[in-house]
Image (tube, coloured by chain):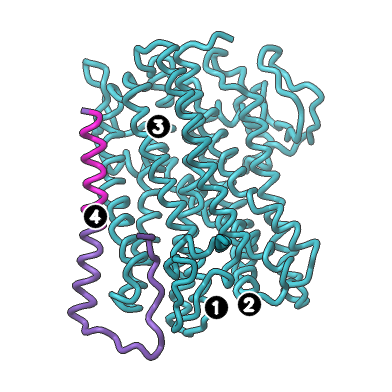
Chain colours: A purple, B cyan
Amino acid sequence: MPVTIEPPPGPDDPPPPLWRRLAWFLGLALASAAATAAVAYALKGLLV
Amino acid sequence: MDLDALILARLQFAFTIAFHIIFPSFTIGLAAFLAVLEGLWLATRRQVFRNLYLFWVKIFAISFGMGVVSGVVMSYQLGTNWSEFSKVASPVIGPLLAFEVLTAFFLEASFLGVMLFGWRKVGPRLHFAATVLVAIGTLISAFWILSANSWMQHPVAYEQLADGSLRATDWWGVIFNPTFPSRFLHMTLAAFLTTSLVVGAASAWQLLRDSAQPESRMALRMAIGMFAIVAPLQLFAGHLSGEVVRVHQPLKLAAIEAYWETRADQPQSLAGIPDRDAARTHYEVAIPGVGNLIQGVPRSEVLAGLDRFPREDWPVVWLVYWAFRVMVGLGLAMIALGIWGVVMILRRTVDRATWFLRATVAMGPSGFVAVIAGWIVAEVGRQPWTIYGVLRTADSVSPVGAGQVSASLLAFMVIYATVFSAGAVYILRLMARGPASGEPPPEAEPETAGRAPGSPLAAAPAEPKEG
């Protein structure tokens, strides 16, 4: 699956509800932080 | 010259850090550029800003990834090749690097995910917040790295324990040591300058092929505006940094300017071949009576020359001397390019000014060269110390053999040549394609050639179909 850089919504696209946008914001941020932490621990595991 | 473990470890660090510094010096400025583009798109809804954002964010993502990978190697080397340094300095340097990871790297890594994958999901305003947070994260990262390096240049607020290790006595003193503010300013401006020159070069390249390309016209004007303002400011920031060096590292200043004698009314050396053994500069071109004025001190004030310091403490003078001149020479060329660009914009001929556009393309890599030259001045100028006046480089190296270090150096050279060359070629290909050619229109997003719209691969040329 190619890595997709998501373009912005079109001018006529109805915005999703605020709670859903906030949930995505938090979810993506936490998932990204978790992915970074996982890589960091994997690298640490290789060294120790 | 014997290639012992010390020389090889230094070569390895120089090689890997010269690769690494290319990426942060680009992404610091590019993250800020993306935040500006998105802010302008939010304010105006002009398609040109959206297209530019989607184009440059791909390059940012690739550069950020390569910066992370090359940065990890740097910290590993502190353990593999510089364990004596780590043993002595880690109680001070370690927390600064940890703060960098916790406050900056995780901020960038977290919100990069929103930047890349969440524009529709989180909506325009939250996405803009993520872009701004990533841009702030890159600056915080530079803050901590410059703080740690500045402390190594001018160690203060510490004590040495009985086992030889150092311990901070005042963390504010360590973080905000006197050499830090001017060096942080100098490096941040260098990053903005580097990015604006790359954006300018990529845009000029497009305009040489099609002078009506709207995204490149806009980006070129933004780039010219940036380097026309920042390049003169950088001259001022560099001078400030030089004054700090004069006060806190007079030996480094003496090497930069090839002051062999301690005297008043120093000359300003423009070019020559510094000879460390003979303690003179061969074939020197110098302006008498100007050196003190350029250093911002009266002509009657005595400025320390290399003769004031033990010879074993001198750095490699010719390298520091010429790296400084390359940096300053390129800085002056950037100022000239900025003035030329502003004149072209005022005459409304910038998009068709072939010679200016060619010069802008040629100056594209100059920011990287100037950054590397500047770091050579800072780091080679500090030799033979890793922590200035406290720990010698020769006492910092791990108890490893030349064979071990040369094996890892060779491995790094092969891997870096492969991975980073591929990355650099890919980025250059993206730049050569230009912003408009690879972007789908906002509503219709055809899955052409099996590549997702907006993905980095979507900018690459479609492969020919078989049969």
Mark 4: few/some/many CA within 10 Å (<14, 14-19, 20+): many
Viewer-closest of B90 and B48: B48
Query: Measuring 59% from the left and 64% from the top, which residue is drawn there?
Result: B226
x and y, in percent, of residue B334 in the image: 68, 54
Check disc 4 and give the amino acid type. Ala
Which residue in the protein does label 2 denote?
B214
Chain identity of mark 3? B
Instruction: Find numbered disc 1 in the image and state the secondary structure of the residue it sits on.
Output: helix
Question: Viewed as shown, does residue B425 lie left or right of B27?
Answer: right
Q: Secondary structure at mark 4?
A: helix
Q: Which residue is mark 4?
A: A33
Above or below B260: residue B156:
below
Residue A16 x, y percent position in the rendering: 25, 84
Task: Tell me if label 2 and label 1 are in contact, CB under 8 Å.
Answer: yes
Q: CA distance from mark 2 to mark 1?
A: 7 Å
Say what amino acid the circle numbered 3 marks: Met
Q: Amino acid at mark 2?
A: Pro
State the CA–CA distance, disc 4 to disc 3.
Answer: 30 Å
Q: Which mark is residue B48?
A: 1
Marks 2 and 3 sit apart, C-alpha to C-alpha, by 47 Å
Residue B357 coordinates in the image, percent (x, y): 74, 63
Q: Which residues are magenta?
A: A32-47
Q: Looking at the image, which residue is at 62% across and 51% down?
A: B235
Which badge, 1 or 3, is on the more N-terminal residue?
1
